[in-house]
Image (spheres, rainbow, N blue to C red):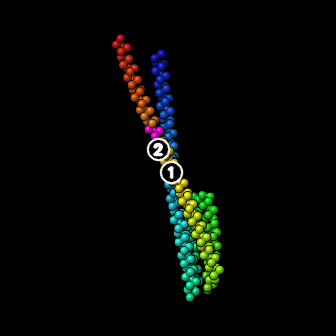
Amino acid sequence: MKIAFSLQQKSKIALLLFCIMACTILIRFLEDKSIKSMNNAFVSMYNDRLVPATDLFNISELLFEKMDAIEKHNLSVISETHQTTKLLVAQDFKIDSVLKKYEQTFLVTNEKNHLQLLKEKLKTHQQLEKQLISTSKGNKITIEQLNNSYKGILKNLSLLTKTQIFVGKELIKESQSLFAGSKIYSAIQFALAIVIGVLIVSIIFASNVMKIKQEKFNLN
């Protein structure tokens, strides 16, 4: 009877230890997944937000250089159409390269719409530039249209930058949530370690008690 009771107790302890082990493995798996997601969020913050934001700033600088070249072209007494055209083509190539690089990053729906609109505005802007430098003196209507186009592109770039900031904040929130989850997993693991420690002490204590009782029984 005592042997059956002892086996039953050992089976319960073994089952409990197995459950604790299974929980520990599951928590470890969830913790690794959380750390991986946190790492992906930080990588995305750099590759998909910080770098593209810098690229958008570069586009605005290139556009300013183009506008400056056209202004100098209009003010110059001697027509330098070929030289101005060459400069504009070079800047357009750089802008196109930046946009292609930008398209390779992760884009949210709102960002895709703004980017498509930006590409359309840039194409219209290039046509206006060609019309302006094709004449010896730029007419006021074309200059006004070009200035309005430039302002529209800058506004679109500003919207894209705001999207970068918004998505960046969402990534920060996600990272904070994942970090909080990791702290909870660590707390559970600590609690399980305490439970395992208590069980080990209880088993040792129970074993010593049984040993003492057995020795007394033998003496009698």
Instruction: Give the image location of residue 26, x and y in percent.
Output: 51, 39
Residue furthest to the left in view is 219
Name the residue that disc number 2 marks.
Answer: 183
User: Can residue 135 be found in the magenta stretch?
Assistant: no
Front position in the image: 161 or 218: 161
Name the residue that disc number 1 marks.
Answer: 175
Q: Which residues are magenta?
A: 186-190
- Please tell me in which quadrant of the rendered image residue 123 appears: bottom right
Three-letter amino acid code at the position of disc 2: Lys
Instruction: Give the image location of residue 181, x and y in percent.
Output: 50, 45
Disc 2/disc 1 C-alpha distance (Å): 12 Å
Sooner in the amino-acid sequence: mark 2 or mark 1:
1
Q: Is residue 51 left or right of residue 152?
A: left
Residue furthest to the bottom in view is 77
Work out whether 33 lies above or below 148.
above
Q: Residue at x 46, y 18 (%)?
A: 3
Front position in the image: 4 or 23: 23
